[in-house]
């Protein structure tokens, strides 16, 4: 324990750099993944059947081990961050799209009917009613995606994407226990920090919409 | 006088249903009436009012609002001119009472001052103190208060026609009575046409200037409460009112 702490302190630069790299990897993934998920979700709203098919497909994709996917993509996009981000964006879709659709479609039908009956266009119903009411579910999805990305990003070190994974793998190769534990601590701390950040966003959204 | 709402030989079928929900309905509702639509569940009451604001479309025949076939106007525009109040209020849980009521005026881009004044006037009208209720969320209201806000929201953009689909179905008897009194008062002072769906015979007799009895998608009888009580046109109407006489 003391050994790990002293190792963390003496190699603070290494850990800090790796954590920042890792955070950047996760952040860019979440940003791109959110945009892609928004597009897929919008498309899925056009038809229930398409939505079910899309969620099934994304679910099947989600069950492929990340290391296999990394390997498959190397011939196409090479080693490094790009491939890592592509794979992680793809993984996030299942969580993000499923949560968003559940939130958007799980609204009391009486509320949707009221908005139509009052003369809202489908776009107004989506933006003013469905989206705010689905916001908690959407943010919950984002939180789950963020945490799983922190984990998957460590595996991305195997394809040279850097981050805390490279610290962990080098610790493994040299059987350097303090290094492994230090990397793990950083991973957990990063996951908790991202989650806390998103929880704050969630609270702000709740406060704004008056939902409890 | 042009009827406020007119059905001309209207039939509506839902996919997969054996019998039509509405079966060759002919009906003319004069402006200013408070029509209560009575009948058993599945008798076509709700379908009837949803055809008026085009939440459903007729398969055959023509539905006219103020003399104009509803298919000849934009559905969204049509709905903005017709008040709509539903069971369980259908209030938007993420909006305050004021924002719920201001919904249609906002869409219609009224200016801020006019909307604020209208919201306060409507809250007064439904007997909720504006300063106390304006900024509350629906979850902070009782069932009866929610229904009052639902009513105010339906009235917000000054529609000539109000459609009310069992609005007091889920409130207790005492609250229901006071809501009925409010509705009568608002109807009398506004001169608008109200079409009110209910399955409660006593409620219909209490409120209606005209009662419309529906069964199996057909109009059984349309007339004043006295006419229906004294000269029921079909056995169904007789039975419906028979329990009371």
Image (spheres, helix red, strand yellow):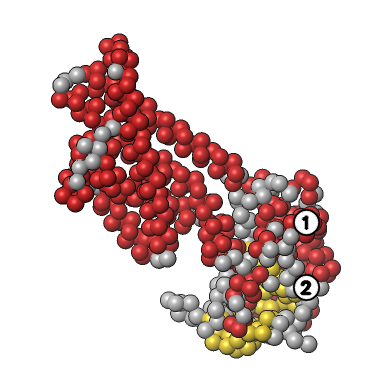
Q: Is residue B54 above or below residue B166?
A: below
Q: Quadrant of residue A57?
A: bottom left
Q: Nearer the viewer, residue A111 or A157?
A: A157
Q: For the residues labelled 2 and 1, say whether their Cβ atoms are less than 8 Å apart.
A: no
In the picture, the quarter occupied by the N terminus of chain A is: top left
Residue B199 in view in this figure: no
Q: Residue at x 67, y 50 (%)?
A: B96
Asked whether, in this view, residue B22 is left or right of residue B148, the answer is: left
The disc label shown at residue B113, or none = 1
2 and 1 marks on the same chain: yes
Asked whether, in this view, residue B18 is left or right of residue B10, the answer is: left
Q: Residue at x 32, y 47 (%)?
A: A89
Residue B5 in view in this figure: yes
- The chain letter for the residue carrying disc 2 is B
Asked whether, in this view, residue A139 is left or right of residue A173, the answer is: right
Q: Is residue B151 above or below residue A154?
A: below
Q: CA distance from mark 2 to mark 1?
A: 25 Å
State the SS at label 1: helix
Q: Nearer the viewer, residue A82 or B41?
A: A82
| Crowding near the residue tagged with mark 2, few <14, some 14–19, many ≥20 C-alpha atoms within 10 Å | some
Q: Residue at x 28, y 38 (%)?
A: A152
Sequence-wise first label, 2 or 1: 1
In the picture, the quarter occupied by the C terminus of chain A is: top right
Q: Residue at x 51, y 39 (%)?
A: A201
Q: Quadrant of residue A43?
A: bottom left
The residue at which mark 2 appears reads as B192
| Crowding near the residue tagged with mark 1, few <14, some 14–19, many ≥20 C-alpha atoms within 10 Å | few
Asked whether, in this view, residue B161 is left or right of residue B18, the answer is: right
Query: Residue A96 location in percent, x, y?
Result: 38, 49
* Marker count (numbered): 2
């Amino acid at each position: 324990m003391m050994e790990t702490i002293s190792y963390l302190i003496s190699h603070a630069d290494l850990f800090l750099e790796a954590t920042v790299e890792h955070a950047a990897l996760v952040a860019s993934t979440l940003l791109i993944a959110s945009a892609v998920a928004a597009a897929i979700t919008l498309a899925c709203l056009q038809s229930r059947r398409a939505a079910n098919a899309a969620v099934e497909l994304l679910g099947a994709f989600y069950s492929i081990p990340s290391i296999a996917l990394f390997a498959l993509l190397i011939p196409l996009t090479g080693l490094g961050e790009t491939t890592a981000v592509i794979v992680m964006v793809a993984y996030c879709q299942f969580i993000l799209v499923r949560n968003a659709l559940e939130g958007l479609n799980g609204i009391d039908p009486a509320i949707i009917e009221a908005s139509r009956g009052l003369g809202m266009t489908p776009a107004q119903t989506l933006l003013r009613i469905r989206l705010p009411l689905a916001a908690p579910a959407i943010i919950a999805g984002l939180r789950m995606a963020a945490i799983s990305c922190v984990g998957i990003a460590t595996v991305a070190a195997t394809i040279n994407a850097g981050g805390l994974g490279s610290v962990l793998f080098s610790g493994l190769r040299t059987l350097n226990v303090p290094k492994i534990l230090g990397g793990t601590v950083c991973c957990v701390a990063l996951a908790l920090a991202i989650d806390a950040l998103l929880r704050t966003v969630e609270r702000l959204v709740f406060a704004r919409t008056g939902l409890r | 006088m042009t009827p406020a709402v007119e059905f001309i030989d209207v039939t509506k079928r839902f996919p997969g249903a054996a019998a039509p929900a509405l079966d060759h309905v002919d009906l003319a509702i004069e402006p200013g009436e408070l029509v209560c639509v009575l009948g058993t569940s599945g008798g076509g009451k709700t379908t009837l009012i949803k055809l008026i604001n085009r939440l459903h479309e007729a398969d055959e025949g023509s539905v006219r609002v103020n003399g104009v076939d509803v298919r000849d106007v934009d559905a969204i525009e049509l709905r903005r001119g017709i008040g709509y109040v539903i069971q369980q209020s259908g209030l938007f849980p993420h909006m305050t009472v004021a924002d719920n009521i201001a919904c249609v005026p906002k869409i219609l881009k009224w200016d801020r001052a006019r909307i604020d004044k209208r919201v306060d006037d409507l809250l007064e009208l439904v007997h909720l103190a504006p300063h106390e209720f304006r900024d509350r969320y629906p979850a902070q209201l009782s069932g009866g208060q929610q229904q009052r806000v639902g009513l105010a929201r339906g009235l917000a953009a000054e529609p000539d026609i109000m459609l009310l689909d069992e609005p007091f179905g889920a409130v207790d008897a005492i609250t229901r009575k006071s809501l009925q009194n409010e509705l009568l008062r608002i109807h009398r002072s506004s001169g608008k046409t109200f079409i009110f769906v209910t399955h409660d015979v006593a409620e219909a007799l209490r409120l209606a200037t005209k009662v419309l009895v529906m069964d199996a998608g057909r109009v059984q009888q349309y007339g004043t409460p006295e006419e229906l009580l004294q000269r029921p046109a079909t056995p169904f109407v007789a039975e419906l009112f028979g329990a009371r006489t």
